[in-house]
């Protein structure tokens, strides 16, 4: 496969993953950056044993870096009691958006992409038990948010 | 709960952009990043560099030697793809999309078919002689391009032979056209589907219709029956109707002789991976289409055999179950609920095993009846009756297979639950032991002055991490603590996940800095980000006591002012952190552990 074939075959997957991790505004940037970095490697995309997994790992790394940089900005907390009630679905989105990057990644891969914890662990570069812990934390946070 | 996550992500992805095109990513020049020297200035510079990229929203780097990774692909020796078909359809070449640097384009081919339901077979011959065959329905009443059956990958929607485009070749008049033909849109034909044929698949097309297909003959169900077919639904809705899990799902249609079809629904979902369901198909009108139903949900299987004569009311209905196909062990948080689920599963296994025995008896009984029918020389024993008896035998066999699957599945689930139960019990034991240890350590920590405390923070605190201690694996500080359940005294990096009074939950991680960071990252095919590289591949956490007079060093503002010293007990809340996420999964700190007690917590600057 050519470099372009490889990229086009994984672009949607990368975009979904990046969007889930950093949102629609910067998903393009994240994907661009990780692909360009990969292209700069000796052998480029073609030289990767598993280009999709490599790029998805890179997306998570980049998302985590951006998350750290982003949270350096002053955090503005919205008083939900004074804002119009949003739908439950919106609330869920808010909770997901508030999850740390790795929890969000685990939740996305398992709940949305329907990876097994082992598959998600391979993408995230951690152990299946770690993925399960992230899922547990994510579930707990969502449950608390919805109950609270 | 899990469905809410799924729904939440659906919402988040509703407005997902298409993403950068190949031209956009391939047109950027790139650099091989130099390995920076370890310095505070370098860290800040690297951070500023990346932040600049973020702010600008575009990635423009500078080429700094090395081969161009996106050199144009070699030109193909043949410049078109030939499309041929046998049915009453017409193809038109529409729109082209430039996809690589070689000057070739993707051609989108529209299939226009008669204004009736039906199938069309299309062969596409690549420049290298490879032939891909596509079978697609042209069902204009149900909308265009709803279903394309071909090689894996089509459910993603794609187009044909990337190295070929519409050329200038003209039709030869014998139903062979190149993709270069101008649009053909005769009256009476309506748009049917796009075809797209990935060329990268090693297994090629699964279709083989040669035996039953003549040129000009319409393709119907019966034509390809008898040939193993892998069917890909390109409609997520269509897959969902069959109880599938989404885009990762596949539906296999296999053929057992010419009599029955068994559809095998494969899912990569969680433990079991494979869910099998059976579909009885009609044969020679013995079973009308509307009497057959199937669903993978709960492995229901129902097939009513209609009466063959006015006096015949026999029917067979297979056992159904509403048991979930899989179990997520992580949803069981306590041993009691696991035990209840294990008992429930075991009951299901026992029940299914009993039914299997009943089914086996039915098989033998009906085989005897079949045998006697086949042995009869009485002309009143019609072929229809024999066929019907065969069908009854086959249904019993399928029912037994179905029950075997239930047993296998539930036994696997019980095994998973038992493993999870063991893990939970072990965790409870560990937690009890950790609590006792914590209390003992807290008592010992009452006076730090009375303890030997070699690991202290030397002011001023640098933004760079502590140097690697001798004898370690070059991880900064005391070494790489990942994989250890018990942190010894030392200076350790990790994430301060939670705080509870004078104890913390800490996720140890390994931090490599500078040259070693690049080497460690390169070892796993990645790059150090801003001169640092982390290893945190076990996710384990430890709970540690913090001394009452422990100091927390928080990085405030823009990091140019260094650390601010606070009392952990009374002054540090975490809100001071420049990351705004302390404590939390992404709160990077160093902890200074003396005599098993944390005496200092130093926030780590990360670019």
Image (spheres, rainbow, N blue to C red):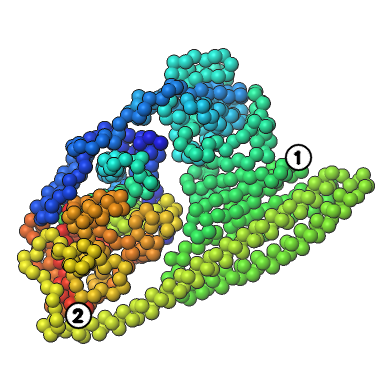
Of the numbered discs 2 and 1, the one sitting upstream in the chain is 1
Q: What residue is at 21 percent from the left and 68 percent from the top?
A: B471
Residue B17 seen in the current view: no
Drawn side of residue B43 relative to residue A78, left or right: left
User: Which quadrant of the structure image shows residue B432?
Assistant: bottom left
Which sits in the foreground, B86 or B283?
B86
Q: What residue is at 15 percent from the left and 63 percent from the top?
A: B467
**Quadrant of the snapshot with the N terminus of chain B:** bottom left
Which sits in the foreground, B592 or B56?
B592
Instruction: Give x and y (percent) for residue B18.
Output: 34, 38
Name the residue beneath numbered marker 2: B595
Q: Chain of mark 2?
A: B
Element class at badge 2: loop
Vertically, is B429 above or below B530? Answer: below
The residue furthest right is B378
Residue B284, disc: 1
Instruction: Give x and y (percent) for residue B208.
Output: 62, 34
Residue B33 seen in the current view: yes
Q: What residue is at 32 percent from the left and 34 percent from the top?
A: B22
Residue A139, disc: none
């Amino acid at each position: 496969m050519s470099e372009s074939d490889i990229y086009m075959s994984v672009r949607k997957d990368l975009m979904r993953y990046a969007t889930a991790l950093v949102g629609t505004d910067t998903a393009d940037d994240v994907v661009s950056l990780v692909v360009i970095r990969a292209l700069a490697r000796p052998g480029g995309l073609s030289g990767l044993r598993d280009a999709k997994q490599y790029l998805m790992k890179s997306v998570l790394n980049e998302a985590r870096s951006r998350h750290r940089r982003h949270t350096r900005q002053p955090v503005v907390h919205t008083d939900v009691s004074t804002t119009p009630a949003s739908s439950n679905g919106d609330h869920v989105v808010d909770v997901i958006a508030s999850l740390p990057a790795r929890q969000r990644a685990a939740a996305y891969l398992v709940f949305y992409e329907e990876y097994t914890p082992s598959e998600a662990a391979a993408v995230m570069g951690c152990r299946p038990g770690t993925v399960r812990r992230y899922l547990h934390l994510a579930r707990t946070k969502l449950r608390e948010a919805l109950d609270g | 709960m899990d469905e809410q996550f799924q729904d939440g992500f659906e919402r988040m992805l509703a407005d997902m952009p298409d993403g950068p095109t190949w031209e956009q990513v391939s047109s950027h020049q790139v650099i091989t990043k130099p390995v920076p020297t370890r310095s505070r200035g370098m860290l800040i510079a690297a951070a500023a560099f990346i932040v600049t990229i973020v702010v600008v929203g575009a990635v423009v780097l500078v080429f700094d030697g090395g081969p161009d990774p996106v050199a144009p692909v070699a030109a193909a020796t043949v410049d078109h793809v030939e499309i041929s078909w046998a049915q009453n359809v017409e193809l038109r070449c529409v729109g082209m999309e430039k996809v690589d640097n070689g000057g070739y384009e993707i051609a989108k081919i529209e299939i226009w078919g008669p204004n009736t339901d039906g199938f069309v077979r299309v062969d596409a011959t690549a420049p290298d002689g490879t032939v891909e065959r596509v079978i697609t329905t042209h069902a204009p009443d149900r909308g265009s391009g709803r279903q394309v059956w071909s090689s894996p990958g089509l459910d993603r929607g794609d187009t044909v032979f990337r190295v070929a485009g519409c050329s200038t070749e003209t039709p030869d008049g014998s139903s062979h056209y190149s993709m270069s033909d101008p649009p053909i849109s005769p009256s009476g034909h309506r748009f049917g589907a796009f075809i797209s044929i990935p060329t990268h698949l090693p297994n090629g097309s699964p279709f083989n219709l040669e035996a039953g297909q003549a040129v000009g003959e319409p393709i119907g169900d019966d034509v390809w029956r008898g040939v193993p077919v892998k069917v890909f639904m390109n409609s997520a809705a269509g897959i969902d109707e069959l109880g599938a899990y989404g885009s990762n799902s596949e539906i296999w249609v296999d053929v057992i002789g010419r009599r029955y079809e068994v559809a095998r629904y494969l899912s990569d979902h969680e433990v079991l991976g494979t869910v099998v369901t059976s579909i009885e198909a009609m044969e020679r009108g013995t079973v009308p289409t509307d009497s057959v139903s199937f669903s993978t949900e709960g492995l229901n299987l129902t097939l009513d055999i209609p009466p063959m004569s006015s006096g015949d009311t026999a029917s067979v209905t297979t056992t159904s179950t509403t048991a979930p196909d899989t179990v997520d062990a992580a949803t069981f948080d306590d041993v009691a609920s696991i035990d209840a689920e294990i008992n429930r599963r075991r009951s299901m296994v026992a029940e299914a095993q009993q039914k299997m025995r009943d089914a086996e008896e039915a098989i033998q009984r009906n085989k005897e009846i079949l045998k006697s029918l086949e042995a009869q020389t009485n002309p009143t024993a019609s072929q229809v009756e024999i066929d019907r008896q065969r069908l009854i035998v086959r249904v019993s066999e399928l029912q037994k297979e179905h029950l075997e699957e239930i047993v296998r599945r539930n036994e696997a689930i019980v095994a998973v639950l038992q493993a999870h139960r063991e893990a939970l019990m072990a965790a409870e034991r560990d937690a009890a032991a950790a609590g006792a240890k914590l209390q003992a350590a807290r008592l010992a920590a009452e006076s730090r002055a009375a303890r030997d405390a070699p690991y202290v923070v030397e002011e001023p605190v640098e933004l760079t991490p502590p140097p690697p201690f001798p004898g370690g694996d070059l991880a900064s500080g005391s070494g790489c603590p990942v994989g250890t359940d018990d942190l010894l005294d030392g200076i350790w990096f990790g994430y301060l996940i939670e705080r509870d009074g004078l104890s913390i939950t800490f996720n140890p991680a390994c931090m490599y800095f500078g040259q070693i960071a690049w080497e460690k990252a390169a070892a796993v095919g990645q790059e150090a980000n801003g001169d640092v590289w982390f290893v945190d591949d076990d996710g384990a956490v430890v709970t540690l006591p913090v001394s009452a007079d422990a100091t927390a060093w928080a990085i405030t503002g823009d990091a140019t002012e260094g650390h601010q010293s606070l009392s952990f007990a009374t002054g540090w809340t975490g809100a001071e952190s420049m990351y705004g996420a302390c404590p939390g999964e992404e709160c990077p700190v160093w902890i200074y552990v003396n005599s098993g007690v944390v005496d200092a917590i130093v926030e780590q600057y990360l670019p």
